[in-house]
Image: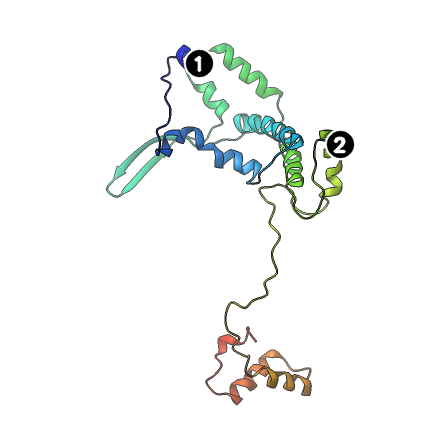
Amino acid sequence: MSYCEREQIEFTRSRPYHKNDQAWIEQKNGAVIRRFVGYERFSGVVAGQVLAQLYQATRLYVNYFQPSFKLLQKSREGSRVKKTYHKPATPCERLLEHSSISKEAKDMLIAQRSELDPVELLHRIRTSQTALAAISRTDGVERPGNENLEQFLAQLPYLWEAGEARPTHRQAAKKTRHWRTRKDPFEAVWPEVLSWLQEDPETTAKLLFQRLQRTYPEKFKNGQLRTL
C-alpha cells in the first residue's frame, strides 16, 4: 500500500467473479512457475527450502537471460484480431531501455548481469527440480521430512540414477490395462487359428490371415491383418 502511494499508483482490489482483473499478475503462473516447478503439491521444511533455492535461481535466469515477447498493440480487422509484438527481449533489457529508470539502477542491473553465468543458473535450477521430483515420488521411496537439506541433496544421485527427474517432465506410472476397447473380431475363429499353428508352427500371420479369408469369405477385411 505504501509503495503504491509513494509511486502514485491507484491501489485496487479485484472484483468478485471477474477473474481477469488479475490477468497481468497471474499470467506468469503457467509460463514460469508451472514450467519450472510442475503441478505437484509440496509440503514440509525441505520442500520449502528447495523451492526457495529454485525460485532464487529461476528469478535471475528469467529476468536476465530468457527473452520473451511483449504485446505492442492489438487491432481488430473484421472477425480477426491482429496482434503486433515488440522484438524479443529479456526483462533486464527492457528496463535498460526504459527512460524512467535511473542511471544508478541501470548500472546496478548491468553489474549484476555481468556476474551471472546462465549455465551455472541452469545447473542450480536442474538440481532443485531433481530434488522436488524426489520429494514428490509416490513409488514407495521414503520421502524426506525435516532432515538437513544438504544431506538430502547428497542422496539424489542414488535416488535418480536413471531417466528424467524434473517434475515438469516426470511421467506418471502407467496402469496395466486389463480390458479391451473393442470386440475381438477373431474370437469365434481363434481355436481354429491355434490348431493351424499347431500343424505348422513356422507359418506367418499373413498366411494365416489369407487362409481365414479363404475359409470365411467376406468376413475379414484386409485392414484386420495387423489385429491378427
- Name above or below for residue 208 compared with residue 55: below
Residue 29 showing in the rendered view: yes
Residue 86 showing in the rendered view: no
Q: Secondary structure at mark 1?
A: helix
* Residue 135 horizontal/vertical position (percent): 66, 39
Residue extending farthest bottom: 215
* Residue for point 60% across, 86% down: 192
- Name above or below for residue 34 compared with residue 52: below
Residue on which the image places disc 2: 151
* Residue 19 horizontal/vertical position (percent): 38, 34
* Residue 176 horizontal/vertical position (percent): 61, 61
* Residue 152 horizontal/vertical position (percent): 73, 34
| Horizontal relation, residue 156 to residue 54: left or right | right
**Of residues 141 and 56, the one drawn nearer to the viewer in this rendering:** 141
Amino acid type, callout 2:
Gln
**Of residues 223 and 184, the one drawn nearer to the viewer in this rendering:** 184
- Quote the CA–CA distance across marks 1 and 2: 40 Å
Q: Of the numbered discs in the image, which one, if any, rests on residue 3?
A: 1
